[in-house]
Image (cartoon, rainbow, N blue to C red):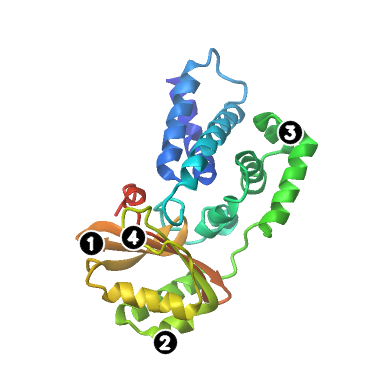
Amino acid sequence: MERLEIFNQHRSLLFAIAYRMLGSATDAEDMVQEAWIRWQLTQAIAQSPKAYLSTLITRLCIDRLRSVRVQREKYVGIWLPEPLMTEAINDLGDNAELAESLSFAFLMLLECLSPTERAIFLLREVFDYDYSEIAKTVGKSIPNCRQIVRRARQHLVIRRPRISLSLQQKEEIIEQFLISWNQGDLHKLIALMAEDITLFSDGGGQVTAAQRPLKGCQKVARFLVAIRRSRLIPTFSPRIVLINHQLGILNTVEGKPQSTFSFEFSGETIQAIFAVVNPEKLKAVKL
């Protein structure tokens, strides 16, 4: 019972690390379960269970990410993270940066890092681990870890995540997007988008989806209006929800998830839309 209680104290942290490492709630749960099995097999309880379990989950995820990346190279079309339905947040406060690190835009940026680079960057920039802890976790020197974080910052061309719009502002834009989309109003949709907007659509080869990113407000708006009017796509009901701690849209057909839309903003316009329509990735979506 003591082992179970200790593990459950850190379960949410382990899942948070695993999901950001793998971009999949299903894989993250698998890694947490594997960590639990290995935790039970340890001869003695570690002096610092948090450090021990963090190291364990990180190493498991590095190994897992190396294997799934081979699979993703053969993925049909665009690969996007698995959407994670999250609870309402009225005031992000000190958790704003942690929530932003769950966004599709942030997770997609991380895809350009190697598994070890990704682990080091996340542990330092998102979870604020000391370099000494990180070095022990990944088996590298402290100077090497510092250098990797510095290079990753430059490579990603980002600083620590910043929230430029309030939740209320984002909600207003998404509500206008939803109204315009439902009405098929091309001009109003375009007005809500950045001129160089990009739409990413992940069907995984199982359903119809754009095989390549769509770029430009005219092209994206016309595509969105077309799928809303298409007779080949079942009539779906959209509503605003929290996906990965960001406001997004969940589309349902007869009470079952059909797709999710996540957004990235630039100023007061939509800079990117991440549409997940792969049925396998929607299994974990809770209505």
Q: Nearer the viewer, mark 3 or mark 1?
A: 1
Residue occupied by mark 4: 259
At label 2, the amino acid type is: His
| Sequence-earlier tag: 1 or 4 | 1
Residue in view at x 35 percent, y 58 percent:
277
Marks 1 and 4 in Cβ contact (< 8 Å): no
In this view of the protein, which residue sits in the foreground, 182 or 205?
205
Marks 3 and 1 in Cβ contact (< 8 Å): no
Residue occupied by mark 2: 187
Tell me the CA gap for discs 2 and 1.
27 Å
10 Å crowding of disc 1: few (<14), some (14-19), many (20+): some
Residue in view at x 69 percent, y 55 percent:
155
Tell me the CA gap for discs 3 and 1.
50 Å
Element assignment for label 4: strand
Q: Is residue 178 visible?
A: no
10 Å crowding of disc 2: few (<14), some (14-19), many (20+): few
Q: Is residue 215 visible?
A: yes
| Sequence-earlier tag: 3 or 2 | 3
10 Å crowding of disc 3: few (<14), some (14-19), many (20+): few
In this view of the protein, which residue sits in the foreground, 191 or 67?
67
| Sequence-earlier tag: 2 or 1 | 2
Residue occupied by mark 3: 132
Quadrant housing residue 44: top right
